[in-house]
Amino acid sequence: MIKKIVSILLFAQLLVGCNGVKNLPVITLENIDKINQISLIEDHVRGVNAVSWSPDGKVLASAGEDMTIFLWDPDAVEEIRRWGGHSLGITCLAYSPNGNLLASGSRDSTVILWDTETGSMLGSFAHNDQVKAVAFSPDGKLLASAGRDKTVIISDPDSATPIHTITSFNDDVNSVIFSSDGTLMVTADSDGNISLWNVESCEQVKVLGDGKLAVLAIAISPDGKILASGGLDTKVRLWDIESGELLFTLSAHIGSINTLAFSPDNRILASGSQDFGIAFWNPLNGDRLAVLPDFSTISRRGHSSEVNSIAWRPDGTMLASASYDETVMLWGINP
């Protein structure tokens, strides 16, 4: 299949020729208003649900309703490899901290662990319904998966063996993440609850949220101090993890919040929405920094369908976004 990858920033093309986009500056509070679409990946043939960066930032993984996992070189903007294995659309992806494993969850109810060097399946296990989120613990010793079956399964990723299952939810579990120190696991569910769990004991230690509309997305700042949440009510909320205090309620979107991601330096929070947009926030004061799409500039027009997943490159030079419009977009600052 012929790749359909379009680089749209002429200035960047002139700098690096046909070899992709390189030497991008870090995206910061000071230049976020200049963020532009650097590259457009169009090889998926159905909606794209998930993007995940390798820990060294050299590879971007994407997957979606076409049941295919792609690995990309983000600098050369070239496909490294692709493979399949699920029988229904892939909903979520996560790289292990050492980069050797990639976990994928699917509408077919399975979680599969893959060798990132070969694309070989190393193991799998099943939920009783669609898998909606997967996350590795910071030390890579645990994998958490959440699903429509109202459970979170904690497993050993090396053997793909479930260790413990949390069954105390009353509705879909839409997201699961670990704190940066690995002591807490956080879940978000369709009951409107955000639950904090002690990883060692698997006991619930705190519940945030109002228990009304579904919470679809959560993210923890790299310093472990702030929790971001969003969902059907279109608001982004920022919480103090230690106290549970609600710090800010942020408004920019007119559709549900599907995905959230903090920049590696803690200073920017990005939110992706059903309204096709991506918004950028200062999590320390709640200020809105920029909003996409911006139809005044062609390189800021963004997606033509809802944004399902966003992820920052570990060095902070790119943001990747995935959409039902069958594309992955790479965002950055003109070099």
Image (cartoon, helix red, strand yellow):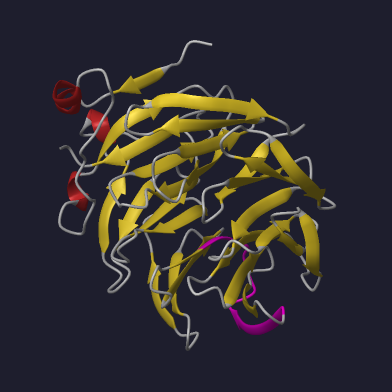
Determine if residue 110 is in view: no
Report x, y in % for residue 297.
Answer: 21, 32
Q: Is residue 329 above or below residue 239?
A: above
Name the side, left or right, on which 110 lies relative to 215: right
Up-down relation of residue 161 to residue 294 (above or below): below
- Quarter of image, res 22: top left
Question: Viewed as shown, does residue 224 lie left or right of 15?
Answer: right
Camera-side residue of 281 and 125: 125
- Please name the residue shown 39% across and 34% down the image: 329
Q: Which quadrant does the C terminus fall into?
A: top left
- For the magenta stretch, what is the residue range? 202-218
247 to 330, vertically: above or below? below
Determine whether, in the image, residue 207 is placed left or right of residue 245. Answer: right
Give the image location of residue 71, x and y in percent.
Answer: 51, 32
As for residue 213 lying within the magenta part, the answer is yes
Given residues 155 and 100, the one toward you in this image is: 100
Can residue 13 be found in the magenta stretch? no
Residue drawn where x is 48% and y is 35% of the image? 305
Q: Name the quarter where the N terminus is drawn.
A: top right
